[in-house]
Amino acid sequence: MTTRRLVLSRSAALLGAASSGLLLPAHAQNSKIRIGLMLPYTGTFAQLGQACDNGFRMALEEKGNKLGGRDIEFFKVDDESEPSKGVENANKLVQRDKVDVLIGTVHSGVQMGIHKVARETGVLCIIPNAGMHAATRALCAPNVFRTSFTNSQPTLALGKAMMAKGHKKAVWITWKYAAGDEAGEGFKEGYLASGGTIVKELGLPFPNVEFQALLTEIASIKPDAVACFFSGGGAAKFIRDYAAAGLKGKIPLYGSGFLTEGLLDDELAPAAQGIMTTLHYSTSLATKRNDAFRLAYAKAFKMQPDVYAVQGYDAGQLLLQGAAAVKGDLSNKKALYAAMEAAVIDSPRGRWTMSKAHNPVQDMYLREVKGKENIVLGVAAKALSDSGAGCKLG
Amino acid sequence: MDLANFSIQLLNSVQYGLLLFLLAAGLTLIFGIMGVVNLAHGSFYMLGAYLAYALTGAWGNLALAVVVGTALSIALGWLLEKLLFRHFYHRSHLDQVLLTFGLIYIFEEVRSMLWGDDVHSVGIPEVLDWSIKLTDTLSYPAYRLFMLAICSALALGLWLLISKTKLGMKIRAGAFNSDMAQAMGVNIVRLHALVFAMGVALAALAGMLIAPLSSVYPYMGSQVLIMCFVVVVIGGIGSVRGALTAALLVGLVDTFGKVLLPQFASMLVYVLMALVLLYKPEGLFKQ
């Protein structure tokens, strides 16, 4: 009897200890790292979201799907590029799924929601696309990193390239909304600094695509060149209308790389020949690193990668480097952030580093549309950094 | 702005205005006669554009695509009227708004299932794929002139139909007082189906015509819908003549606003609407 009672009481004590966590190994070392992917999987930006997702997973896959030796677990939320649900969706990952790191997103409006949650909860956040200035300027945060660009970064490199071609007077045209204004800010800074004059700034409400009146105006002004920021469907229409209005071949067209990114199909390519853009990547970049990346990506996903896939891939690489430095203990935030700030990313786009405000310091390539590709003509700006104005980090 | 430039901008305004008219004519008729606030009107425009894309892709002939596409959209309009809208004529505007708002999502989802979320483009037919040289830097695309001609013809045809034919008389009577028209022997049920199908077809036709100029992309209807409502409100609800005047007016203000006052371009049209509402709360041509 006594032995049986003893066994019972000892078992009870054991159970108690177990439930209070005394006998369990420390949580952080053994459980899986929880990764939240908040990207647009449906809607207009679905392809961009999927490309980021593919690239990110590919980077982790290459290292055996482990972060600093720990296993990983994915949680996915479709943000639908819907800004009004940004905070709610980010909270689903942070509060409900308790993710250790949040990867997202594409749309700048949704990013504002994620950013709010990231700043409030302190969760590590890596932005694989959205270029809104605030995230790495006035509202920058120690726990928020970006592996893409700021909206003004690509256009900042345009001015020098245009002046080199002798285009001293230019018209700037874009959509009147945050991304367009920020891209305009970059263009103005770069072009004026290189000695150019902006003779007129034209704009139309986002995402209006009735360009005819503005093209007529451009034809009557006859500037040396036109610089613009448009993307997606609107960009395709702008390129087409520009050619149809007889401006192509007469007044050179320049733009941020998003003007031609992912749009050069059989229909559009003829109208787009000769357009010069600046961007931090081009699929045609002839480096061993890029070739290997393209081959591996095509094998894994049965499609060609684009700039969004590269940005997602680099988000994975950045996280890998950070996690390796702290041996998978993401709760050691100080060391983790320090490692991510010091990271050198060997990207398909070329090597890049982090600015103090947590935005890539990267080369901007000058590209020209030839056939159905953006052919790299050279580096338009070496190690270009965003000003990070208003950020007090570092 | 010199005279040549001014004339070209005038041409641009008229062309944009006439396209808006095609869209707004259906909307104003449906609202005026059936009293239905049709938020899904923009979806028909999008559907038209996608039909042009799909059918041209299949047959390689835009003209054929437009003919078949128009027939299909008439059928769709007739079917929707019979199955859905008919039951909402006497419901509150809130119910109608909910129905048509829901329809927008259904159409977008169908579009996504059928054609995906990609941006597509439709080639300009070869016969019209050239430009007329106007100044040494500017050419005017022949397709735009063609569209201008088609839209003018349609606007004229619609005006003749409404003001000169017996059917037009019935439509006007229906817009003025549908109960009375019915009492006078107008088959109002059939008239409703007809007007609705016509409205849908006009919107879809506008979409098909614009497809080669514009790209074809998701949610393209929501953008023009707002402009359509502005046109309908300025012109006076239910008035086709009002819609035409207002569409041309909006085209003018939008075009010259963009060029002369680029920083205020986005709001000029709404300022115009506010001014009209201030002095003529019922629109320019309230019947």
Image (cartoon, helix red, strand yellow):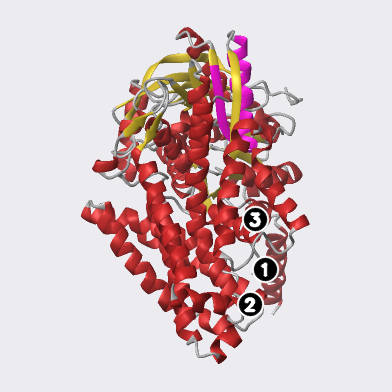
| Numbered disc 3: secondary structure | helix
Tell me the CA gap for discs 3 and 2.
25 Å
The tag on residue A234 is none
Please name the residue that numbered disc 3 is placed on: A85
Amino acid type for the residue under numbered disc 1:
Ser
The tag on residue B95 is 2
Q: Please state which of the two labelled residues, at mark 2 or mark 1, is closer to the viewer.
A: 2
Q: Please state which of the two labelled residues, at mark 3 or mark 1, is closer to the viewer.
A: 3
Quick check: is B63 in the magenta stretch? Answer: no
Point out the tag, 3 or 1, that comes first from the N-terminus: 1
Residue A278 x %, y %: 47, 22
Q: Residues at marks 3 and 1, common chain? A: yes
Please name the residue that numbered disc 1 is placed on: A11
Amino acid type for the residue under numbered disc 2:
Asp
Q: Residues at marks 2 and 1, common chain? A: no
| Relative depth, front residue between A111 and A214 | A214
Viewer can see residue B207: no
Name the residue rendered at 78%, 56% in the picture. B278
Q: Please state which of the two labelled residues, at mark 3 or mark 2, is closer to the viewer.
A: 2
